[in-house]
Amino acid sequence: MSESKLETLKQHRKDLLLAEVAAWLHDMGKCSDEHVTHQASDCPSGHQYRYKTAQSYLLPASIPPVSLLGDAVSVKDLIEKGVPKAISQQSEPWILRVLGRCHSVAHVEKELDDNDKSTKQRKSDTRLSSAFGIEGPPVSGLTSLLNGLPFGSLTDYNAFIAAVKDAFARAIGDTRRPVNEVTLTDWSATVSCLYKSALAGALLGTQPDPDDLRWRLLRINFDVLGLYAKAIKIADLLAYQDVVRGACEAVKRLVEDEYPLGNEVYRDTTGVYFTFPDLDLWPELRDLLRKTVEGVEGELMPRIAVGSALGQKATEQLARILHHERSEARKALAYPVDPENDSLCWQHQWSNAPSKSEVCPICRLRPMPEGEETCEHCWNRRQSRIEAWKNNPAQTIWLDEIADHNDRIALLVGKFDLNNWLSGDLVQTMLVQAKQNDPEGCKPKNPSPARLRRVWETCQRFWADTVENTILEQYQYTNDRSDVALRCSRLFVTPDNKAVWRENVPYDGTIGGQPISLLWRNNEKHFVTIINLQLAAGGAKTLQEVQDKWSRQGIEVSDPDNPRKRIQFKIDAVARATDSWGQYRPYLTLLTSPDQFLAFIPASESLAIAERIRQEYQRQFGKVQNRLPLFLGLVFFQRKTPLMAVMDTARRMLKQLPIPMHEETWTVECSRQGNPNWHLRLSRGEQRVSLDVPVTMGDGTTEDAWYPYFFVENGVNINGRLYRFQHNDGRWLVHVKDLHEGDRISITPCRFAYLFLEHTAQRFRFDPDRDVSLLDELPLLIEMWERLHQSGITDTDLRGVAAILETKAEMWGCESQEFLHLTETTLKVSGLWQRKDKPDTVTPEEVLSGRFSRCLELYLRILKARLKKERDHEQQPATV
């Protein structure tokens, strides 16, 4: 292929984008209250509603036809006639028949018979479900959303499609349960991207019969976590975050808009993926994509490839293609540099470098003069990130502000194992049709493209909406202490000497023996504090007390160019920061993708935040928690710990997790109706897991016979179980309410890990077998600390108990009878076990399992929590 192929796409750009809009709108009538009424179980008799044509009046008369491949078809005809039955109508234009084919291929989740009325919802109580069976409130106001779309500016394609996405996200592709999980946005986006790529392929020479259409995926991959691990300062890390996002958006504009070939269908820590015609990647396009990425940042070193068309049928191929391409991407990213990325630009930079040059410690690629901190490129990138922060100072970018009152921070690491979901295998553990005592009549869900999109989108929304925009955004102190105002406030500090300071460079120093960090604002001729004021307050409890204490006091800071050189100055004035500078949010999100999440949070709040995430996970993923595991990790570190070590620890933590996480055999100890969920207690050796599984739909009354299923081990007698069916791998799934005590089931448990970086070498000591525990342990650790609080034991006595048990465990071994006897005696004497008329605080089993020592390590050693205040001003970890 030649460059003229790209020109062909460019010449037909407007028609390709208009066809994409038509595909988005081809089911727009479903975004209406009339459609919900028509599909409802209590639809009024005689109600007539032709949703394909009911909104035709919304289309402007001036809209041009789609003119491609010798055909000119109106958008109205594409909307009204682009249905599956058009595929076989040879008299219809090819571009119309292809839209019907894309509809058919994308919409294989409509497995229910159109005459099946049994799972219809009432019109006033029609609900949209997540991919995993958790329903939201009843939908309403859809017609007004549709009427509010800017049809008058329909040919402003990108803006119009953005508006359509927002409106259609509230509408349902099919209102019947359990196929009410796909939104009209998911559904229309899938049809439009397949249609766009099919038309582009035809323009480039591949125009098969609609029944023979095939698609591929174009992938542009980066080692995102490897890039993050290079950052020395937080501004470097955020700059890398920006360039990854910028590169993805630049490629997106090129593939989707400038040369319309397809649409983005997925993005995560491996890169970005687009639908693509059934064509090989030609050199000109590869070069253009590479230059586009390198124009944003050469360090990304993209791997660019187009996958093969898998499967005999398009439906089979599309169910496997994303999983396959992600696997291929991970293999490619295992090698940091390949010959493709040996760009001449790097050779040019070194051949023109000064004679005395060394490798930049940040990018590790460019030359820099000896003695400098960074190369010019990295320095400019760092400065630009600080300048960008000034436009939104309420969102901190400073670890000094995130640090808690003990000067400690936690990196929150979250991960979903989506491998077997995106392959479609686990989608087929959910039913589209459930029949009692009829395994053959139970029909698994098909892994359609729209349904797979809904799976990863549900996970993406969990991290973005639930964790970042709800749990972290609502971060606050809830106690009544007057010093809490110090936590998230800033001060303006005016020095007596205003002529020696550099802008955009943090100044670290001390005031009254306490740490302080400042940033110079040259136009205003004052500093702004960029540190948690609790660390710098020196015993002051309020902002006013800090202002009074600092007035005319001296500050000593290090020279950024020569840290050994100290600069001293007196404070002329101290004032509360105004406008958006006054308050900040003490967390920083680094990564939000469907499979992974990273954020810096205060260490003192980390366990409370992690527990809220766990609770929300159980609420939103409760029906599939046995086969969609969540991993939560916490990397604790001191404020001045090198950032590279912290990010490398998180990278190792994620890399050393077995992916896919191991499936394990557990035994059912208890299976009963809880309040309101079904309660399971499972055992595996000495381990115990409790699962509360929702068994009704969003109305609270409809029994869920479609989602909450468990794999049972071979040999388990499944006869008599009301709801059971066989997976395509031969294993049997049984509904949670049909599990019996003694059943052996296969689950993939959620996991939890933490690591304290006392020194940078600690990152090499993370051991999954030793350091990773069940996520169920997290609330037990929190509960144990609460019990210790209520027990009345002092910090000194608690440390004494811990020291005795730790010493003897090393000498005798935890499994010895001597240690068991000592444990029982020590707990009794200390009043923690077998107290009269009082519940136990700590049991011998909790000591032998290691939970007691982990609790004390977390709270006493890492979080520096105390059971009793020794001084009135002593800080206690706040609660979220």
Image: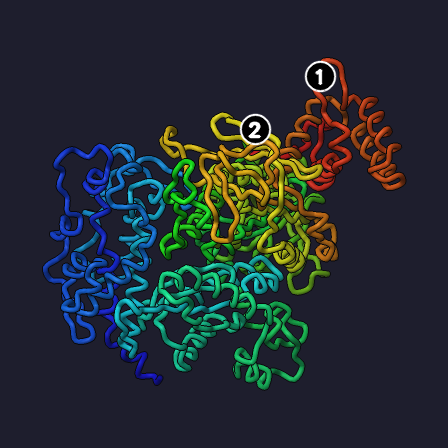
Disc 2: which residue? 479
Q: Nearer the viewer, residue 737 or 261?
A: 737
Q: Which mark is residue 369?
A: none
Seen from the viewer's position, the closer of residues 305 and 378 is 305
Query: Which residue corresponds to the image point at 57% horizontal and 37% vertical from the top-left?
Result: 611
Q: Nearer the viewer, residue 615 or 47?
A: 47
- In the picture, measured across the screen, residue 766 lies left or right of residue 89, that is right
In this rendering, the answer to whether 332 lies above or below 75 is below
Which SS class for mark 2?
loop
Residue farthest to the left, as pictured: 61
Please tell me in which quadrant of the rendered image residue 483 appears: top right
Residue 143 picture location, percent across and down? 20, 43
Identify the residue shown where x is 65% and y is 84%: 355
Residue at (55% x, 70% y) in the render: 332
The amino acid beneath tag 2 is Asn
Vertical relation: 569 (above or below) 129? below
Quadrant location, the C terminus:
top right
- Residue 186 % position (x, y): 34, 53
- Identify the amino acid type marked 1: Lys
The percent coordinates of residue 726 (x first, y second) are 47, 47
Residue 471 in sight from this viewpoint: no
Taking depth in this image into account, of 560 and 428 the one nearest to the observer is 428
Percent position of residue 351, x then y:
59, 86
3D distance between C-alphas at marks 1 and 2: 28 Å
Q: Secondary structure at mark 1?
A: loop
Q: Is residue 736 left or right of residue 698?
A: right
Residue at the disc numbered 1: 838
Front position among marks 1 and 2: 1
- Mark 1 / mark 2, whichever is N-terminal: 2
Drawn side of residue 722 relative to residue 140, left or right: right
Characterize the local packing of mark 1: few (<14), some (14-19) or many (20 or more) Cα atoms within 10 angstroms. few
Crowd band around label 2 with a 10 angstrom C-alpha radius: few (<14), some (14–19), many (20+) = few
